[in-house]
Image (cartoon, rainbow, N blue to C red):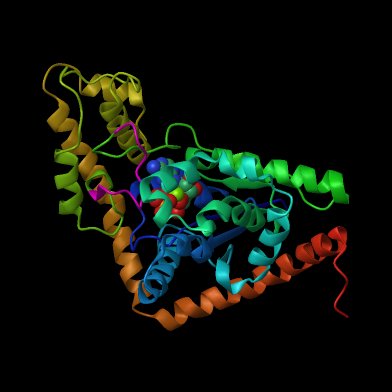
């Protein structure tokens, strides 16, 4: 069976609605048709310098949210990136076939480095895309379910795999990005031209899966919209309203056209926001309850992750060996 792999960074205790709608919903949908690997990418999260106890806690909470959102650990392989040393081992090899200029063109690096300034920017942030390529290529992954923001990293992954294969002989499977339609980029409520981000400076723009519903309701009430007072789906001219319509539609299953009709007329922004808040609470409440249950038994969670790491290593070790052999590393036995 073809494989999928995806992951999230434990850069915050809670995932936001963008992570859920842009990535996780597809993970759950795809896990039965593919041999699925879902990784908590703690090595990527280290690039933003978390406190050790924070990183540990967030790694567990993120894994719990995978399961709470519908990932079945008996069907999918759920594991922690740092438990599988092959990820950083392959990343080194990929670093050595990546052009400096090619890496410097990555817009996520430019954005994050821009926000953090030269002093706050470490080399890990720069080599992040090659570690991500290793995450994917290590499992002979055919499809990678991610949000729109990962498209460029996926293109780089494909380029590196093709380059490696051309230079050293057929070694890696070339993966495809699997990016959803309307939910690929859920926008910040405060700045509807930027995506929701766990690491955003203004957290008021994020709907967090583990917040109390009333916190999200309040954030939605103060969501930035526009002054023309009529609900229409126009992402260019009315990004705030388009974002609310997309969120409502994704959660309720109603079409955007039907929603536009429902909120026709003047002064319906308030009603739309209230209804979105209700839809968000409907998924969020059981999600949070399930996370609390899972966190009440951390030993069981750790057992699931240990089992996942073992399964992941059994695949990754073979692919790494193939790559090591191809580049000419001397076998160690
Ligand atoms: P950070 O700010 O720390 O980078 P993030 O919010 O970007 O956090 P990631 O852990 O980097 O989240 O990404 C996890 C997954 O969620 C990826 O597949 C990514 O494409 C997807 N994703 C992130 N933000 C959004 C969003 N606003 N809309 C849709 N998908 C998203
Ligand atoms: Mg991100």
On the image, which quarter does residue 21 sit in? top left
- Give the residues drawn in magenta, as a range: 192-203
Q: Is residue 187 left or right of residue 8?
A: left
In the image, taking residue 19 as reference, residue 269 lies left or right, namely: left
Q: Is residue 102 above or below residue 95?
A: above
Q: Is residue 55 above or below residue 173?
A: below
The mark total stands at: 0
Q: Is 276 placed above or below 265 here?
A: below
Q: Position of residue 225 (x, y in %)?
A: 20, 28
Q: Residue at x 31, y 23 (%)?
A: 258
Question: Residue pushed farthest front?
Answer: 119
For residue 325, above or below residue 204: below
**Rendering coords of residue 174 (x, y %):** 74, 44
Q: Nearer the viewer, residue 10 or 282?
A: 10
Q: Residue at x 45, y 66 (%)?
A: 63
| The magenta stretch spans residue 202 | yes
Q: Is residue 25 visible?
A: no
Residue 119: image quadrant is bottom left
Q: Is residue 77 magenta?
A: no
Residue 53: percent from the left, percent from the top? 37, 76
State whether residue 36 appears in this view.
yes
User: What residue sits 52% from the left and 65% below the top?
Assistant: 43
Relative side of 60 to 238, left or right:
right
Please state, as top left, top right, bottom left or bottom right, where the C terminus lies in the image. Answer: bottom right
| Main SS category, magenta section | loop
Front-lying residue, 72 or 321? 321
Q: Residue furthest bottom?
A: 299
Residue 30 in picture, x, y percent from top left: 57, 49
Relative to the observer, which residue lies in front, 3 or 329? 329
């Amino acid at each position: 069976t073809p494989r999928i792999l995806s992951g999230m960074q434990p850069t915050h205790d809670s995932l936001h609605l963008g992570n859920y709608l842009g990535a996780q919903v597809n993970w759950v949908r795809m896990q039965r048709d593919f041999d699925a690997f879902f990784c908590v990418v703690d090595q990527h999260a280290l690039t933003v310098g978390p406190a050790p106890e924070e990183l540990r806690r967030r790694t567990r909470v993120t894994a719990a949210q995978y399961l709470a959102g519908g990932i079945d650990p008996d069907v999918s392989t759920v594991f922690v990136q740092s438990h599988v040393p092959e990820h950083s081992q392959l990343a080194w090899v990929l670093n050595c076939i990546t052009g400096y200029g090619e890496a410097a063109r990555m817009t996520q690096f430019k954005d994050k480095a821009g926000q953090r300034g030269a002093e706050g920017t470490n080399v890990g942030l720069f080599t992040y895309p090659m570690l991500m390529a290793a995450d994917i290529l290590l499992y002979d992954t055919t499809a990678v379910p991610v949000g729109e923001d990962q498209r460029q990293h996926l293109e780089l992954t494909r380029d590196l795999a093709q380059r490696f294969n051309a230079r050293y002989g057929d070694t890696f499977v070339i993966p495809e990005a699997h990016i959803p339609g309307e939910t690929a980029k859920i926008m910040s409520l405060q700045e509807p031209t930027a995506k929701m981000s766990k690491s955003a400076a203004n957290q008021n723009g994020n709907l967090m899966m583990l917040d109390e519903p009333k916190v999200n309701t309040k954030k939605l009430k103060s969501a930035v919209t526009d002054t023309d007072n009529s609900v229409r789906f126009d992402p260019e001219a009315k990004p705030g309203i388009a974002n609310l319509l997309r969120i409502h539609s994704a959660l309720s299953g109603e079409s955007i056209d039907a929603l536009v009709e429902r909120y026709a007329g003047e002064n319906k922004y308030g009603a739309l926001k209230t209804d979105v808040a209700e839809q968000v609470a409907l998924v969020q409440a059981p999600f949070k309850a399930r996370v609390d249950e899972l966190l009440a038994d951390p030993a069981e969670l750790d057992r699931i992750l240990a089992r996942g790491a073992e399964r992941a290593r059994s695949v990754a070790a073979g692919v790494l060996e193939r790559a090591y052999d191809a580049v000419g590393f001397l076998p160690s036995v």
